Amino acid sequence: MKQRALAPVLRTLAFAAMLVTTGLCAPVAFAEKYASIVIDADTHEVLHARNADDARYPASLTKVMTLYMLFDALEAGEVTLDERLMVSRFAASQAPSNLKLRPNSSITVSDAIGALVTKSANDVAVVVAERLGRTETRFAQLMTVKAQSLGLENTRFVNASGLPDSRQVSTARDLAILAEAMFDNHGEFYHYFSKPRFSWAGKTYKNHNELLETVDGVDGIKTGYTRASGFNLMTSAERDGHRIIAIMLGGSTSKSRNAHVEALVEAAFHTYQIPDDPADPGRNIEMAFSAFGSAAPDPNAAAEPMLNGQRLSVANAARAIKFKTLPAPGPTLAPDTDDEEAEEAEEILVADAGPVAEQEFEQGDATPTSFEGATVVIPAGRPAFSVSEYEARQSAQ
């Protein structure tokens, strides 16, 4: 009887030993920007959390919100998968990772989705933003309103790509909510996140989410990286009828991030193999994730993310998150990329000599409308919302 009672404990100890000996819990997985959370997507139970509510830079995980907005528009009939989206000079000027789109060229909505998921193309993110919001700045306001309506209480967007901006912050918990909303509300489009490759203009790009091909059950969704954020990963996996969502932010390398998230996924599914004790609810979860207890990051180092050598004040971030109105644009940041290490040194594509300013991007027949007191031109066939109108629409849903 005693031997039988000890069996779950012994299995857990063996599992923990496997994590340590294979390097999955190695400290190299943690950087000063580290945060993580794992949730059961069916019960919404939090299985693991570390710094889950601390402000962090989402990097290209931002594009999951951009895609969510695009899927909203597809479901509403505002765009179609075969519609061609025009490329502005501003969109074409975006830093890597990008498709090197040229001004006045075009890309279909279907290809835009593939480029955002797989290539993490920043130029495509702006193309989508300009199609849905007229300018990237206005689109980012709509993204933030939508995020709030989904329950992302500590998230604020100022661009559609995730390129560095100290005002653009989120949390591991908010990003888990976003991943869950994507699966629940746009399940018919979720298969895009499972594609291992994307082909465009004669080139094939491999999905940066290597866990798709290496971890059993992983079927999405997105990686992200800037020097400011560290290596981020939002992933989802399903085994034996259980779906989990795991978020890790601030990894020091893509390899250590992948190993750490794999360990989180394995620990999550291990909880379902350990019998729960009615006298001690949650003990199975504690046992499954016990291997992570000794790998806790320095809380002082993890307190704030860094941007170009400057600490982000959580107090300022919390104040900015109120975002009833956007603050004045921040200073221009040094060029940075949002992609894996190999593309960090990729040359920035500039469509024309000199800086390219954001401007209204128009095409086709246009009609004037009012946006927060200013008259602007809205291309025919495009949704025209003020932020207040969009906020009211979200509140009514």
Image (spheres, rainbow, N blue to C red):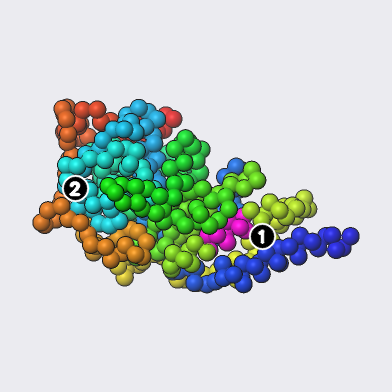
The residue positioned 46% from the left and 66% from the top of the image is 255
Q: Is residue 308 visible?
A: yes
Q: What secondary structure is the magenta-colored segment mainly?
A: helix
Disc nearest the viewer among 2 and 1: 2
- Mark carried by residue 102: 2
The residue positioned 44% from the left and 38% from the top of the image is 189
- Mark carried by residue 133: none
Q: Is residue 319 visible?
A: no
Query: Tag 1's secondary structure?
Result: helix
Position of residue 359 in the picture relative to residue 198 (left or right): left
Magenta segment = 260-268
The residue positioned 40% from the left and 30% from the top of the image is 75
Of the 4 image quadrants, the one containing the N terminus is: bottom right
Within 10 Å of disc 1 (Cα), the crowding (few <14, some 14-19, many 20+) is many
- Which residue of the protein is positioned furthest toward the left in this rendering? 353
- According to the picture, the residue beneath numbered tag 1 turns out to be 288
Q: Label 1 amino acid?
A: Ala
Percent position of residue 31, x then y: 45, 69
Relative to 79, residue 17 above or below: below
